[in-house]
Image (cartoon, helix red, strand yellow):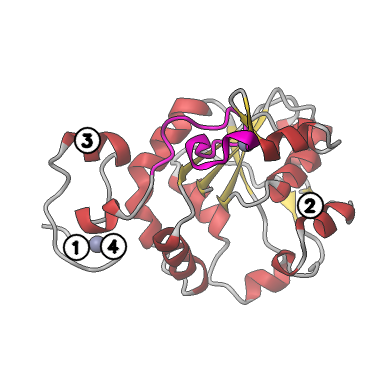
Amino acid sequence: MPNCLWCGARYEEAIRWTRLLAHGRSGFCARCLEKLEPLTEDLCEVCGRDLAALDPRYVKGNVCGDCTAWEADPLGGVLKMNRSLYVYNGLMRDIMARFKFKGDAVLIEGFLDGWRKLYRQHFKGLVPVPVPLSAERLATRFFNQSERLAELLGVPYGDLLRRPRHGEKQSKKTRRERLARRDNPFVLAPGAERFRGQGFVIIDDVYTTGATVRFAAAALAPLRPARICSMTLAR
Ligand SMILES: [Zn+2]
Ligand SMILES: [Zn+2]
């Protein structure tokens, strides 16, 4: 019997079909899995969030209010679609914190099956592109979490973006402030030209406002991509 990658408890591997269908094979025990909310149905067509959890007045057809607002934004159209594996709830936040800030790289291997399935289902053939960290931030971390997530897909990925200088921490600003500051933190990496015309899926740990992946998509735009999407572990 394996040990749960989160709580350490020994557990029997998924026997129940419902659980297997919702999560795939997983490195977490049933008690932990029960606290995770898979994003599988009734999703916003664009960003992949759970529409049932929203106030109906905030939903237009199959699109959430945030995505409707993005449509009116010059940055909005660059990103075709986002899909995420789980809701960013309490346990997911704790898992991400241990993964990112404590450098527990093995932890996310518990998501391997579902993560690869999400890629095959929506983004097959697209080149995964991790969101880069600035050199300063990378120095305070054990690794770039987006790059780890791109590696986990098991297909060749493109290290096509750079984040040249350390901007202010995004979390300290409101969405409006971030968007008002239109200077894109990302630039194309040297050699990115040889990926011209391909399709890309931007890889990040969490989709929050959608600004980060849209900035990354805008930075890829000079390559005239066939399609730009994004994929995150949590939403
Ligand atoms: Zn557990
Ligand atoms: Zn949406």
Question: Tag 3: residue type?
Answer: Thr
Give the residue pinned by disc 1: 3
- Of the two numbered discs 3 and 4 in the rendering, the one whose residue sits closer to the viewer: 3
Dots 1, 4 in contact, CB < 8 A: yes
**Pointer 3 or 4: first along the chain:** 4
Q: Nearer the viewer, residue 2 or 20?
A: 20
Give the residue pinned by disc 3: 18
Mark 2 C-beta closer than 8 Å to ligand 2: no
Rendered view: 34 above or below 219: below
Dots 3, 4 in contact, CB < 8 A: no
Structural distance between the alpha carbons of marks 1 and 4: 6 Å
Give the residue pinned by disc 4: 5
Question: Relative to residue 147, is residue 85 drawn left or right?
Answer: left
Q: Residue at x 43, y 58 (%)?
A: 92
Q: Residue at x 67, y 29 (%)?
A: 80
**Pointer 1 or 3: first along the chain:** 1
Q: Residue at x 73, y 48 (%)?
A: 211
Residue 78 screen position, x and y as percent: 76, 32
Range of residues picked out in magenta = 38-58
Q: Nearer the viewer, residue 159 or 166?
A: 166
**Few, some or many C-alpha atoms within 10 Å of disc 1 (few <14, some 14-19, many ≥20)?**
some
Residue 165 screen position, x and y as percent: 82, 66
Label 3 secondary element:
helix
Label 1 secondary element:
loop
